[in-house]
Image (tube, rainbow, N blue to C red):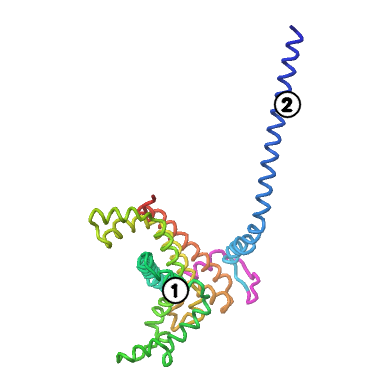
Amino acid sequence: MRDGELTLQRLKSENVVKVKLRVKSTKLSKIKESSLGYLFLAPSLLLFSLFLFYPLVKSVYLSFHLTDPRGRVAAFVGFDNFTTLFASELLWNSLKVTGLFTLMTVPAGIVLAIITAALTHIKLPGMRIFQFMFSMPLAMSVSTSAVIWLILFHPTLGVFNYLLSLVGISPIQWLPDPSIALLSISIMTVWMNFGFNYIIVLSGLQGIPDDLVESAKIDGAGPLTAFVRIVLPLLSPTLFFLSVISIIGAFQSFGQVHLLTKGGPAGSTEVLVYSIYKEAFVNYQYGTGSALALVLFAIVLLLTIIQFAFVEKKVHYQ
């Protein structure tokens, strides 16, 4: 009897040891998997730290200091840079220009992408050619696009003024005129972003089942009614994503402004990012430039939060 109890106790102890060893090996394997995952993520984390986190921390630090032309910290001024910034006309003019630029580019770009994607989504011969053509602007760099549009906007040799002269309209000063310069850059930006917008909307349309549209047509709905009542609600997640990305991209626009007008004429195209560039790398006011960059970050963050808080409620997820 006693031998049986001893044998039972020995078996229990062996089982406990086995369970502990199994738990220990499981923990070791999880640690190894986690270590391997962090090892693969290390290059990305290093790049993010070097080009994202460090500049962000450095901008916060510089925004509370005055700097000399070499970028070296000269004195701690607290919130004086922000006070000076909000009291000057630099910020408010840049906000006005950036707001107008966003209103001119984002809705027009999304509507144009919806129309062209809907027309080329039809299964007809030759649609692949149009899809390729409409996607082409995505492959163009900002500098290349700027050179093309500089030629198009040329006051005497440009194609646009030539076409206007054919119908008896006098030439337009597309870029030198303060009243139309921002519109000209907005037209170029809509074209430049069109390839990306088109691909995103077309991908969203391809993810919508054709059976739903065909059922609506059987029930008597016309093509336009079926598109508005069925396709657009199902496309709303894609359009929501595109609107968020487009607004962020509009507030970060810099290349086309720098290459076409350099913020002029008379500050009519001086968007926020170009103001940051001019303040920091032209006027050598790194403290004020950093403060302006943080204001831009706060504005973009606030707009994104507002979109997720209010606009996302109207998004119909399947």
Name the residue located 58 percent from the left edge and 65 percent from the top edge. Answer: 59
**Which quarter of the rendering shows the N terminus?**
top right
- Residue 315 is covered by the magenta coloring: no
Whole-percent x, y for residue 96 in the image: 40, 72
Secondary structure at badge 1 equals helix
Whole-percent x, y for residue 241 in the image: 43, 59
Residue 87 is at least partly visible in this image: no
Q: Residues within 10 Å of mark 1 (few under 14, many from 20)?
A: few
Residue extending furthest toward the front:
125
Secondary structure at badge 2 equals helix
Would you identify the image quadrant in which residue 221 lies? bottom left
Amino acid tagged 1: Met
Amino acid tagged 2: Val
Would you identify the image quadrant in which residue 3 lies? top right
Q: Which residues are magenta?
A: 68-90
Q: Is residue 96 above or below residue 45?
A: below
Marking on residue 172: none
Label 2 sits on residue: 17
Label 1 sits on residue: 133
Residue 3 is at least partly visible in this image: yes
